[in-house]
């Protein structure tokens, strides 16, 4: 199982409807941070859009405390480098229905409801382009909702298994975890059966070929997602001492059935035990394409504004003009008032010095202007749009700044120094501190899809260039009296303080979290919740 710390705090519900955590001061915000892969962490944020026609504003700050020996600093790592390492995605949140709720096609809020409404009203009539797109969107939305529900179940079970034995932590007993796994398998079977029954009913109706293609793609995607969930469930419960033979056999039987189903339907997404089989090469790629196809029902577009770049170019032009003015003044003074003839030694020296000063004045004025400009304008700014409905959702602004550790906000500094090792780390050399700020303003358009999720993925690959070998031998005295070398991991710690504020309530209405990324030259070893 991948080593990862998953930290969650929100007002959402668990897969059966129970709360998973809440913050009384920030009721519309949820977040989760985890390791995405060997080189990246992922922060997921959830925002509720207002339904009363007003606007809502949120600000997210990520303070990075980087050891000085990693070579991260203003000269080697600037804002452009940071934004190259950062990937951001903003989309609608999938419909919040548990797995059993998704199997209830009679639910008025079910993603597939438009298909049933079309079947009851005009199922025998040919579809026009608008109706076909609407039904296709409903199919993809169901696939995205199923994927989200399965992900919630996997995370819930993983957290329960990881919390076993921890005192003071509310969790299920091993018996209850096995029972929960059995109910999960039953819900997966029910959803697959209901969806395929619906697909069979739609085969003889006058549906657009693109709708049938969407049904086939989502069917294959759900089969893969179900199979992945079943494998992860088996891994989670395999070490539990409780009797689980029937649950394990039920999961394995469903895995075999899904593999045979995809084979019988001619779906290419199958893995062969033979490592050289060419189908294995295409498996991950096809799974990824199907996932993006289903998730595209939730996609939003961020249209970058050119205002920041244009203003920066204007500041640079003004700086160049002022510097040139200085050079012209020197030229006029040296010829008219100093009465130096053109091309004389004095005039040439004055011209060279003026040129040197002009170049420095231009750079100094541009840097000064950029610093002053940064107080009022973000580094990047964009408009969040829903292209499917041709409407604006909100505005996103991003900034990147280095901060002197002595000028840090008092709360942030207090959180950082709460770590028992912080004193030693700070004494051993100046940590590089930079802050990424993301501010999002959402418009209150209402509608059923009013919740948004913001996904931020940050890559640590640039940090590993100056790291030592990942393993270092340390001599120990064994029980038999012999001296032995034990290979110990050489790790580096990047500390992160997360701050999320609801600006509608005021900047002081914020939640904080202290996180730590443990790195080696091979990448991320784990992510820890430090406080």
Image (cartoon, rainbow, N blue to C red):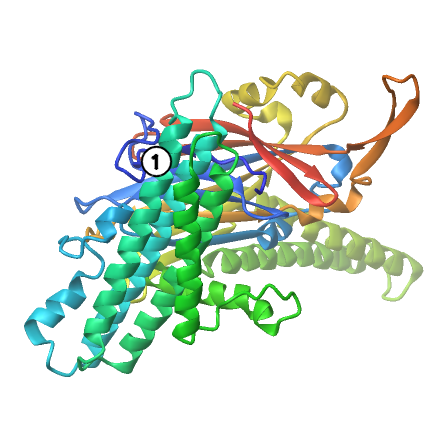
Mark 1, residues whose alpha carbon is within 10 Å: few (<14), some, or many (≥20)?
some
Whether residue 53 is situated above or below residue 135 in the rendered picture: above
Is 525 or 326 nearer to us in this picture? 525
Name the residue at 52% across, 20% down. 410
SS state under label 1: helix
- Residue under numbered circle 1: 179
Q: Quadrant of residue 198?
A: bottom left
Identify the residue at horizontal 59%, vertical 25% (top origin).
407
Q: Residue at x 44, y 64 (%)?
A: 259
Rendered location of residue 200, percent (x, y):
23, 72
Q: Give the total number of marks visible in the rendering.
A: 1
The quadrant where residue 26 appears: top left
**In the image, residue 489 lies at what x, y percent?**
76, 33
- Residue under the image location 34 percent in, 66 percent down: 219
**Residue at the left extreme of this rendering:** 121
Query: 102 or 511: which is nearer to us?
Result: 102
Residue 103 or residue 68, whichever sits in front: 103
Between 429 and 130, the one nearer to me in the picture: 130
Which image quadrant for residue 121?
bottom left
User: How far across and down, in percent of the image, does residue 426 sit?
Assistant: 70, 22
Quarter in which the N terminus is drawn: top right
Q: Is residue 20 above or below residue 201?
A: above
In the image, is 27 to the left or to the right of 341?
left
């Amino acid at each position: 199982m991948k080593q990862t710390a998953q930290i969650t705090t929100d007002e959402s519900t668990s897969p059966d409807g129970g709360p998973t955590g809440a913050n009384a001061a920030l009721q519309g915000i949820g977040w989760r941070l985890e390791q995405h892969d060997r080189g990246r962490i992922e922060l997921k944020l959830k925002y509720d859009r207002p339904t009363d026609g007003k606007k809502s504003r949120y600000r997210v700050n990520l303070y990075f405390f980087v050891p000085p020996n990693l070579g991260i600093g203003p000269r080697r790592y600037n804002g452009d480098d940071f934004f190259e390492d950062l990937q951001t995605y903003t989309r609608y949140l999938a419909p919040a229905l548990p797995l059993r709720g998704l199997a209830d096609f009679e639910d008025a809020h079910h993603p597939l409801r438009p298909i049933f409404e079309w079947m009851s009203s005009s199922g025998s009539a040919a579809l026009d382009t608008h109706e076909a797109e609407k039904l296709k969107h409903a199919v993809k939305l169901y696939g995205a909702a199923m994927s989200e529900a399965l992900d919630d179940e996997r995370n819930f079970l993983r957290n329960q298994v990881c919390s076993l034995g921890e005192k003071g932590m509310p969790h299920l007993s091993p018996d209850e975890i096995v029972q929960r796994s059995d109910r999960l398998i039953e819900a997966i079977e029910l959803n697959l059966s209901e969806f395929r029954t619906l697909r069979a009913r739609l085969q003889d109706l006058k549906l657009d070929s693109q709708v049938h293609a969407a049904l086939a793609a989502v069917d294959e995607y759900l089969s893969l997602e179900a199979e992945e969930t079943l494998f992860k469930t088996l891994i989670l419960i395999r070490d539990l001492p409780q009797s689980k033979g029937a649950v394990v056999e039920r999961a394995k039987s469903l895995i075999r059935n899904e593999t045979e189903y995809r084979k019988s339907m001619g779906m290419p997404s199958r893995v062969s035990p033979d490592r050289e089989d060419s189908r294995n090469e295409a498996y991950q790629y096809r799974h990824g394409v199907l996932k993006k196809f289903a998730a595209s029902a939730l996609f939003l577009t961020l249209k970058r504004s050119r205002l920041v770049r244009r203003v920066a170019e204007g500041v640079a032009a003004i700086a160049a003009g002022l510097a040139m003015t200085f050079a012209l003044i020197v030229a006029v003074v040296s010829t008219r008032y100093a009465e130096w003839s053109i091309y004389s030694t004095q005039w040439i020296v004055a011209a060279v010095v003026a040129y040197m000063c002009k170049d420095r004045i231009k750079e100094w004025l541009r840097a000064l202007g950029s610093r002053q400009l940064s107080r009022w304008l973000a580094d990047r700014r964009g408009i969040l749009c829903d292209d499917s409905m041709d409407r604006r959702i909100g505005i996103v602004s991003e900034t990147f700044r280095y901060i002197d550790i002595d000028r840090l906000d008092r709360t942030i500094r207090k959180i950082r120094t709460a770590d028992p090792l912080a004193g030693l780390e700070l004494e051993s050399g100046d940590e590089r501190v930079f802050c990424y700020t993301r501010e999002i303003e959402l418009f209150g358009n209402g509608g059923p899809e009013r919740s948004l999720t913001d996904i931020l993925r940050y890559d640590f690959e640039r940090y590993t260039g100056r790291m030592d070998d990942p393993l270092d031998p340390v001599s120990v005295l064994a029980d038999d009296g012999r001296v032995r070398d034990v290979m110990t991991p050489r790790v580096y710690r990047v500390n992160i303080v997360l701050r999320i504020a609801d600006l509608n309530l005021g900047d002081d209405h914020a939640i904080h979290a202290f996180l730590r990324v443990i790195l080696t030259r091979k990448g991320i070893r784990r992510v820890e919740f430090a406080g």
